Amino acid sequence: MSYKKRIFDLSGSLSAFLVGMVIGLCGNVLWLVLLIVFLMTSFGATKYRFEWKKSEGFQEGSKGERNWRNIAANGAIPTIISFASFVSESASGGDPSANWFPKDMASYLFVSSIAVAASDTAASEIGIIDPRVYMITTMKRTKRGVDGGVSLTGQLMAFVAAAYTSVVAYVVFAAINQDLLAGPPTLFIPMLCGFLGCQIDSVIGATWETRGRIGKLGNNFTSIAIGTLIALALALASG
């Protein structure tokens, strides 16, 4: 369906299938549901005023489709979290005290990583319509589509996407499997880290990416990783 609807090209569809299988089997099926929600909302953001984006050269792919590189950049961290959770649970032999990466902590970090990806996608795909763009490192006016450029619309959508992802995850976990909840941090910290991760993406874009030290997809991976690590640090600090 994703291939037919041109959400992904063939390589992207196959890669997304593999990522989904690992997350669904090694992690939790509700994580897969959350990933699908992220996929559909991101597709909606991509298609928003797509013809205008295409006329201006801001579109992703020929029809908004993503490839395997996009899947790797945005799906690597959630996949690693899922696999690590599986390894920890298997090695513990059913002893909760021996499980160094329990499902509630893994879920909390999984949601945080998805929140960063959702925040960045919404900021990029919807924020691009705002002509009032400022370089994040200097706050000076710049052109649309420039690496490191941010706008009020983009910032608003970044927060909305991070909040939406966190709220949906919290409600679904609370209603179906409360073992996936790490308490209020499952709601508020992914919301915060998702938005922060988007800002980190912009800063990297204005510095390393502009200088050719990292590509767009490398930036995506790095910002998601940093946002997730911030969430982990906050969890450890709060005990």
Image (spheres, rainbow, N blue to C red):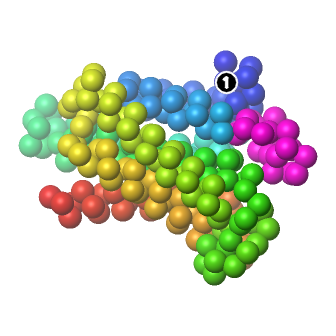
Residue at point 81% right, 51% down?
A: 58
Q: Which residue is mark 1?
A: 2
Magenta run includes residue 49: yes
Front position in the image: 65 or 135: 135
Q: Residue at x 58, y 34 (%)?
A: 41
Q: Is residue 2 left or right of residue 26?
A: right
Which stretch did the figure color magenta?
Answer: 46-66
Identify the residue at horizontal 58%, vertical 71% (top origin).
203
Taking depth in this image into account, of 136 and 91 the one nearest to the observer is 136
How many marks the image carries: the answer is: 1
Does residue 137 appear left or right of residue 146 in this picture?
left
Q: Position of residue 42 (x, y in %)?
A: 61, 38
Residue drawn at x 16%, y 38% as measured from the top left: 92
Classify mark 1: residues with Cα within 10 Å, few (<14), some (14-19) or many (20+).
some
In the picture, the quarter occupied by the C terminus is bottom left
Percent coordinates x, y for residue 235 in the rendering: 24, 57
